[in-house]
Amino acid sequence: MSRVTLVQWQMLAAVVDHGGFARAAVAVHKSASTLHHAVHKLESQLGVILFEPVGRQVRLTEAGEMLLRRARQLIENAEALEAAAESVAGGLESEVSLAVDQIFPVDVLARAMEGFSEEYPFVRVKLYETVLNGGVEILQDGRADLVISSIAARGFLGEPLITLRFIAVAHPNHPLHLLGRPLDLRDLEQHRQLVVRDSALHKSTDAGWLEAEQRWTVSHLSTSQDMLERGLGFAWFPEIRLREAFESGRLKPLTLGDVGSRLVPMQLIFRDQDGAGPAIKSVAKWLKEAVLSLKPFDYRD
């Protein structure tokens, strides 16, 4: 059991922050003698001199400075604990589980979570990065409060969030680009396609054109992009995620005409919208705002 109370540390911090016992007494609504007594008792309990006289003033000793730094952490943690307890008592969730398909723009997700963090800094977030049916499966298993998916979830209502354009891309030196003419889907059949595996365990689906004789399947979109940039195949990829790769010349759209792109609408799905608490609703709000702030990008411009 600690011999020193949190109040004693708070009084010590007050004396330092307000430049002396008299000013601190006014600030914390205590008498100066009470503060003197608290500090002297603290010194006695710890066996350490905290203040030393400098003329008519006092200042922290080296040991006092070190202990006060540690004490401030204790005070901040106690205040955070009280704030968290008040939030829970008011119906705030302690954790939000969010499943997001990997095709969703990473910078949009990050901006949304930054806003949420400022509003609810003590709520934990569990993020699942899913592919295709993976998010729906997590939703149906009751493991996610919110899901961003391009797949409809039976028994759940979703609302439109964003529509992404997928395009066929490859390294600028890929043989398909070296043909030097407009391509059709038959040209793709002779070359390796990179595909991201459905993350669902029980019901998986392939998406996109899959007629290539060669196919490599990976688990994450970032792995697919890395292989694309190494010239190891072609892939259908969310256009919005390729701005930098196009600008730097690491990737180039395949010239497939109208068949070279497809639109994929994504939905925001609540597990229980009526029963959602303030933190879950806040995540949804910040996601919608972040999508609205997204700068449009069209590789054809």
Image (cartoon, rainbow, N blue to C red):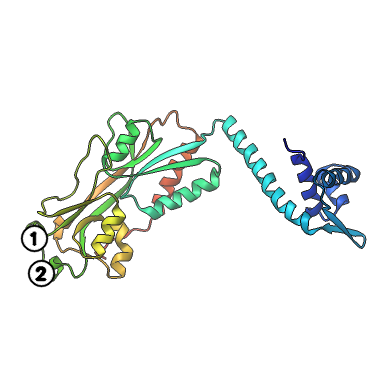
Q: Nearer the viewer, residue 165 or 180?
A: 180
Q: Would residue 288 appear left or right of 219 to someone viewing this image? A: right
Asked which secondary structure carries label 1, the reply is helix
Q: Position of residue 84 (x, y in %)?
A: 60, 37
Q: Earlier in the sequence, mark 2 or mark 1?
A: 2
Q: Quadrant of residue 301?
A: bottom left
Identify the residue at image location x=34%, y=35%: 138
- Residue corresponding to mark 2: 179
Tell me the amino acid under the disc marked 2: Leu
In three-dimensional space, the C-alpha distance between marks 2 and 1, rounded to whole angstroms, equals 10 Å
Q: Quadrant of the N terminus?
A: top right
Identify the residue at image location x=45%, y=28%: 275
Q: Quadrant of residue 159?
A: top left
Q: Residues within 10 Å of mark 1 (few under 14, many from 20)?
A: few
**Disc 2, disc 1: CB below 8 Å?**
yes
Q: Position of residue 102 (x, y in %)?
A: 32, 49
Q: Would residue 198 appear left or right of 118 to someone viewing this image? A: left
Q: Quadrant of residue 128?
A: top left
Q: Would residue 277 appear left or right of 156 to someone viewing this image? A: right
Vertical placement of residue 96 versus 16, above or below = above
Q: Nearer the viewer, residue 139 or 257?
A: 139
